[in-house]
Image: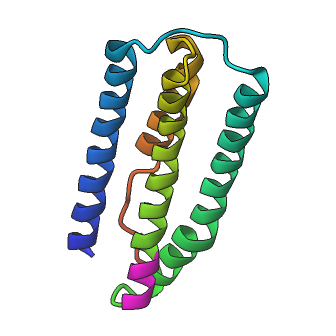
Amino acid sequence: MNQALKTLRAVQWSLLGSMVIYVALGVIVRPVLRVIDPTLSYLFTTVAVAVIGVIFVVRRTLVFRAEASLAAQPDDALSLKQWRTGHIVTYALCEALALFGLAQRFLGSSVQQGVPYFIGGFVLLLFFRPQPPQTVSTT
């Protein structure tokens, strides 16, 4: 469990660092500003909202169920694997949000249009830090 927790924390911090690099890249590279088709902007927003919904579904189906199982049986390898997989999938989806902001920036939007994606991905990734499941005492 401790090794999985250390691995997940390393993955989390690595992805947080990559999001900072995405923001810097979007600001430094300065793609040519042009008007993006509003349909494309709406598409990015709709997909981002869907991704956030999927994040919460993954947390409920993989992470929370595995945490409940690990609280009862800390040595359960299958639950530990599901718990770790749930966190990694959650982190990848949070990273996707930041990539939406970077993609919009490279398509020609302003920095301000990509900021909600960067902030959303960063805050969600920071919020979903891995915590060891609390073991259930049978007293």
Q: Nearer the viewer, residue 61 or 22?
A: 22
Where, quadrant-wise, is the C terminus in this rendering? bottom left
Task: Tell me the colour scheme of the image.
Answer: rainbow
Q: Nearer the viewer, residue 49 or 75?
A: 49
Q: Is residue 87 visible?
A: yes
| Identity of the residue drawn at 51% across and 22% down | 105
Q: Is residue 125 above or below residue 79?
A: above
Report x, y in % for residue 98: 48, 36
Relative horizontal placement of residue 74, taking residue 82 as reference (left or right): left
Q: Is residue 50 above or below residue 123?
A: below
Q: Nearer the viewer, residue 42 or 72?
A: 42
Which image quarter: residue 71? Answer: bottom left
Q: Is residue 81 above or below residue 35?
A: below
Magenta highlight: main SS = helix
Report x, y in % for residue 12: 33, 50
The residue range painted magenta reads 77-82
Q: Is residue 30 above or below residue 19?
A: above
Where, quadrant-wise, is the N terminus in this rendering? bottom left
Relative horizontal placement of residue 13, taking residue 65 as reference (left or right): left
Q: Nearer the viewer, residue 78 or 44?
A: 44
Q: Is residue 137 visible?
A: no
Report x, y in % for residue 63: 52, 69
| Identity of the residue drawn at 64% across and 49% down | 51
Relative horizontal placement of residue 134, taking residue 117 as reference (left or right): left
Which image quarter: residue 47? Answer: top right
| Identity of the residue drawn at 77% across and 21% down | 38
Residue 86 part of the magenta segment: no
